């Protein structure tokens, strides 16, 4: 817990607003530290970290940015510096939370800065484009918080002060209250969905906890996958159980509900032991209030709620999904096993269920057998993913890995 808040923005054009933010933080008993990410102008008073220090942390200079005569080039250079410098300052224990103010340019920078900080560091962005479709999911830090900077593009007024003061209080309160992830037990990262469609976690979580592990289950609907991949990239998991890789298919088939192109790759790059299963592989989730993608217009579907609808892949699309999964797992450098439940991979595709497709399931299984890379152990199971046999097979392999030292308690 702490009360030191890094306040970031272009002080040459938004000095009054940034100074107001810092003043609210200080009035609430917090400490405001200031970072200038301007290019052309200068703040009214010196900041704790100047624009020169920021851009140089990313390997460039203000002179180079100005000489380029390209505001996009200049702000990307500044964004690299802001991300690098902020990450270093946080590692050194200099600040406890960050708040960034900006329009579209400042928000572009803010996304890089927030993504460079670990999960658990309060990250607030006050932006004129908050919640905009311009912001791709893969650029959002998994625990980023945003508030619309309403009515504040040019100067202070009572409308924008409402947004600014809320954000200042929120980031300070978060920094004081946050309980960062503990590392007192080894952590298992698992992906899943609600119990109506996938149920293995109900059995696995308490069993793994009995073995002395902490289990975090990530909801694989875009941002959940981003958080999962972020922690995998840090090497935070003792073992990965990626049993709901549907986001891979979402990205492959162009859904807006994406966890980004690096989904199902970061655990492998870090050499983490990972178990994988194709939970909900056959469904593509799309935004429920959007028109369905052309390729899925005539496909069977399930309207989960007003936000989310799932469309069933064809046999050929399932083969594409199998090849995509295999290609991603081929890059894994740690112990990797792929479970293949041959009787189905979500509750709606059981025999006799509304979305059952025996031909499509057979096509997927066949393609997995053909494309499974040599570094991956393929374990075929004569059961459904929601059957007790699946969870039992996972625990059997986990106990073996534990005994062999593949999964470590420290």
Image (spheres, rainbow, N blue to C red):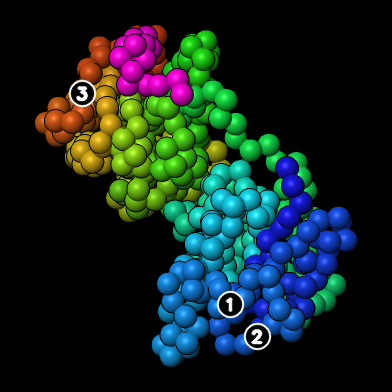
* Mark 2 surroundings within 10 Å by alpha-carbon count, few (fewer than 14), some (14 through 19), many (20 or more): some
Percent of width and height locating residue 142 = 54, 47
Viewer-side residue, 196 vs 124: 124
Evaluate whether residue 384 shows in this view: no
- At horizontal 59% and vertical 47% (from top left) the residue drawn is 143
Give the main secondary structure, helix, strand or loop, of the magenta stretch. Answer: helix
Q: Is residue 409 magenta?
A: yes
- Which one is earlier in the sequence, the residue at label 3 or at label 2? 2
The residue labelled by disc 3 is 377
Percent of width and height locating residue 70 = 44, 86
Viewer-side residue, 25 vs 283: 25
The residue labelled by disc 2 is 42
Residues drawn in magenta: 392-410
Residue contact between numbered discs 2 and 1, judged by CB atoms under 8 Å: yes
Q: In this picture, is 408 found above or below 320?
A: above
Task: Residue 322: name its quadrant.
Answer: top left
Evaluate whether residue 260 shows in this view: yes
Which dot, 3 or 1, sits closer to the camera? 1
- At horizontal 60% and vertical 35% (from top left) the residue drawn is 181
Q: Is residue 46 magenta?
A: no
């Amino acid at each position: 817990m702490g009360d030191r808040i890094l306040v970031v923005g272009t002080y040459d054009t938004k000095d009054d607003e940034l100074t107001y933010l810092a003043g609210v933080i200080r009035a609430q008993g917090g400490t405001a530290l200031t970072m200038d990410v301007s290019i052309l102008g200068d703040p009214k008073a010196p900041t704790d970290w100047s624009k020169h220090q920021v851009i140089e942390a990313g390997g460039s200079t203000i002179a180079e940015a100005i000489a380029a005569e390209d505001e996009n080039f200049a702000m990307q250079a500044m964004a690299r510096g802001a991300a690098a410098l902020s990450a270093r300052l946080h590692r050194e224990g200099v600040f406890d939370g960050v708040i960034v103010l900006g329009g579209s340019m400042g928000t572009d920078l803010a996304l890089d800065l927030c993504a460079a900080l670990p999960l658990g560091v309060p990250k607030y962005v006050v932006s004129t484009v908050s919640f905009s479709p311009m912001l791709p999911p893969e650029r959002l830090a998994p625990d980023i918080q945003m508030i619309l900077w309403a009515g504040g593009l040019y100067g202070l007024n009572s409308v924008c002060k409402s947004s600014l003061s809320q954000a200042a209080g929120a980031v300070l309160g978060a920094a004081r209250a946050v309980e960062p992830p503990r590392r007192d037990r080894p952590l298992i990262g698992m992906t899943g969905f609600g119990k109506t469609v996938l149920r293995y976690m109900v059995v696995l979580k308490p069993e793994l906890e009995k073995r002395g592990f902490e289990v975090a289950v990530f909801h694989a609907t875009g941002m959940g996958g981003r958080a999962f991949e972020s922690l995998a990239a840090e090497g935070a998991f003792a073992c990965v159980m990626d049993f709901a890789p549907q986001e891979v298919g979402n990205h492959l088939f162009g859904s807006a509900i994406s966890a980004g192109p690096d989904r199902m790759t970061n655990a492998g790059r870090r050499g983490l032991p990972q178990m994988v299963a194709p939970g909900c592989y056959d469904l593509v989730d799309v935004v429920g209030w959007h028109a369905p993608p052309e390729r899925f217009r005539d496909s069977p579907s399930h309207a989960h709620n007003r936000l989310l609808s799932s469309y069933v892949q064809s046999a050929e699309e399932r083969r594409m999904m199998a090849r995509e999964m295999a290609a991603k797992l081929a890059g894994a450098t740690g112990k990797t096993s792929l479970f293949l439940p041959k009787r189905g991979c979500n509750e709606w595709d059981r025999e006799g269920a509304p979305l059952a497709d025996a031909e499509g399931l057979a096509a997927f299984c066949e393609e997995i057998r053909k494309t499974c890379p040599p570094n991956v152990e393929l374990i075929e199971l004569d059961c459904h993913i929601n059957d007790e046999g699946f969870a039992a097979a996972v625990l059997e392999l986990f106990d073996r890995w534990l005994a062999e030292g593949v999964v470590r308690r420290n």
